Image: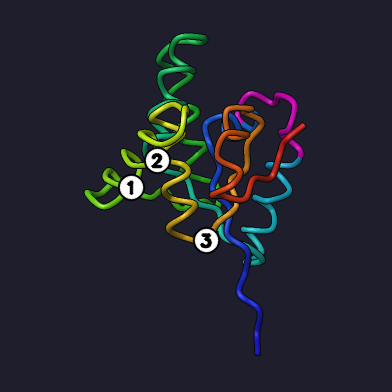
Amino acid sequence: MEQPSPVFVFDTHALLAFILDEPGAAAVQERLLAARDSECLVLVSAMSVGEVCYIIERRNGIEAVEASLALLEALPIRIVEVDRPTILSAARIKARHPISLGDAFVVALAVDRGATVVTGDREFKRVEQIVSVLWLS
C-alpha cells in the first residue's frame, strides 16, 4: 500500500522567509522542491497571502507586492480560499488559544488537512498540542 505524501501548510513567516531570503528560506525551498517533484503537497491559506501582501507593501511598496504575488503564483503551492467552515474553525481555535487570527487560519487549515505547519513564528508553540509544527531556524 502506497504511503500518502506529506502535507505542509506554510504560514506568513515561512512565505516571507522564502520571498525575502531570510533565515529559514533553505528549509522552505526544500519543501517547495519536494512539492515540485510531487513528493509532498504545500498549502497556503489565502489569509496568509493577504498578510504577506500587507507586510511587503509596508516594507517595500506596492511594486514589491506585485512581484511577490507573481512569485507565489509560480511556486508549486496550492492557495486555499477561506470558506465558512474554515472561518468557524479558525474562530474556535482563536477563542481557545492565544494566537493571532491569521495564525488561527493556518492552524485550522493544517488540522483540516492533517498537515504540518511550517513556521519560525514562536506563537505556534501555543498550539503544538493540536497541530504538528516544522520549525524553521
At horizontal 61% and vertical 74% (from top left) the residue drawn is 4
Foreground of the two, 129 or 27: 129
Label 1 crowd bin: few (<14), some (14–19), many (20+), radius 10 Å: some
- Answer with left or right where residue 87 lies relative to residue 75: left
The residue at which mark 1 appears reads as 89
Q: Position of residue 77 (x, y in %)?
A: 51, 51
Name the image quarter holding the C terminus: top right
Query: Nearer the N terminus, badge 2 or badge 3?
Result: 2
Q: Position of residue 91 (x, y in %)?
A: 31, 38
- Asked which quadrant contains residue 13, the reply is top right
Element carrying mark 3: loop
* Amino acid tagged 3: Gly
The answer to whether 56 is drawn above or below residue 34 in the figure is above
The answer to whether 8 is drawn above or below residue 120 in the figure is below
The residue at which mark 3 appears reads as 114
Name the image quarter holding the N terminus: bottom right
At horizontal 66% and vertical 64% (from top left) the residue drawn is 37
Viewer-nearest of discs 3 and 1: 1
The residue stretch that appears in magenta: 19-26
Q: Where is residue 49 in the image (x, y as percent from the top left)?
A: 42, 34
* Amino acid tagged 1: Ser
Viewer-nearest of discs 2 and 3: 2
